[in-house]
Image (tube, helix red, strand yellow):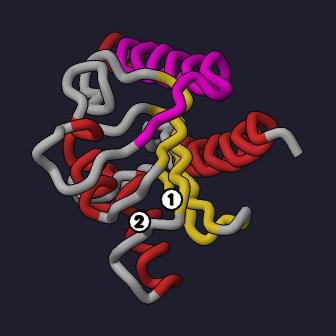
């Protein structure tokens, strides 16, 4: 099978995770971690529900993958995420030694895989991360745009009804 088709297949699984988060009122960001062609961990944003800054999709998935593999090093894994990771998640990805991250869409306000900073390619770190960007980009971007559009409308309606 074409590697690009595999990337799309696994990004669709990350999008499914994002949609799970969206159903509970979270910003729709999803992540899956793949090893040997199989998903070993999944995650979606739960910050609002958990009331925890650390409850990002990537960190949830990394935690589950480490438990599944029995190791903190995820050197033979690929991480798929619908939105470019923030500084916290990018740092965790580097620390976990994940070699490849496949990104749906850029995060111009907080992305640390190239938009604001590129923590994946700091030469002084003992690990660098390869990235593939733009896999199902329009779908990932539209999902976020629609979420925030709806959120702004709900907040406006609530404010007007007070």
As drawn, 72 above or below 157: below
Q: Quadrant of the C terminus?
A: top left
Would residue 90 appear left or right of 142 to someone viewing this image? left
Identify which residue, 95 or 87, lies in the foreground: 95
Q: Residue 49, percent across and down?
A: 37, 56
Would residue 158 appear left or right of 105 to someone viewing this image? left
In the image, residue 148 lies in the stretch drawn in magenta: yes
Residues at discs 1 and 2 in contact (Cβ within 8 Å): yes
As drawn, 46 above or below 4: below
Identify which residue, 25 or 140, lies in the foreground: 140
Name the front one of labels 1 and 2: 2
What's the residue at 62%, 67% (across, down)?
A: 35
What's the residue at 55%, 20% (across, down)?
A: 141
Q: State which tag comes first along the sequence, 1 or 2.
A: 1
Q: Residue 15, percent across and down?
A: 64, 41
Would residue 53 appear left or right of 137 to someone viewing this image? left
Q: Would you identify the image quadrant in which residue 111 lies?
A: top left
Q: Residue 9, percent across and down?
A: 77, 44
**Farthest residue toward the left?**
124
Identify which residue, 48 or 160, lies in the foreground: 48
Can residue 162 be seen here? The reply is no
Q: Residue 93, percent across and down?
A: 33, 54
Q: Which residue is mark 1?
A: 43
Q: Would you identify the image quadrant in which residue 66 lies?
A: bottom left
The residues colored magenta run: 130-156
Q: Decide whether the magenta segment is chiefly helix, strand or loop.
A: helix
Can residue 111 be seen here? The reply is yes
Compute the Cα span from label 1 to label 2.
8 Å
What's the residue at 89%, 46% (across, down)?
A: 1
**Farthest residue toward the bottom?**
70
Give me the disc on residue 62: 2
- Secondary structure at badge 1 equals strand
């Amino acid at each position: 099978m074409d590697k690009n088709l595999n990337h799309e297949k696994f990004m669709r699984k990350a999008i499914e995770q994002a949609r799970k988060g969206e159903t509970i009122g979270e910003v729709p960001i999803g992540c899956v971690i793949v090893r040997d062609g199989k998903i070993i961990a999944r995650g979606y944003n739960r910050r609002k529900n958990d009331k925890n800054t650390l409850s990002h999709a990537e960190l949830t998935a990394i935690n589950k993958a480490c438990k599944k593999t029995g190791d903190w090093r995820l050197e033979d894994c690929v991480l798929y995420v619908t939105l470019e990771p923030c500084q916290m998640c990018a740092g965790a990805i580097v620390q976990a030694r994940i070699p490849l991250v496949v990104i749906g869409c850029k995060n111009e306000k907080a992305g640390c895989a190239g938009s604001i900073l590129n923590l994946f390619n700091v030469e002084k770190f003992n690990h660098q991360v390869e990235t593939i960007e733009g896999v199902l980009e329009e779908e990932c971007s539209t999902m976020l745009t629609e979420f925030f559009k709806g959120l702004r409308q709900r907040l406006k309606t609530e404010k007007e009804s007070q």
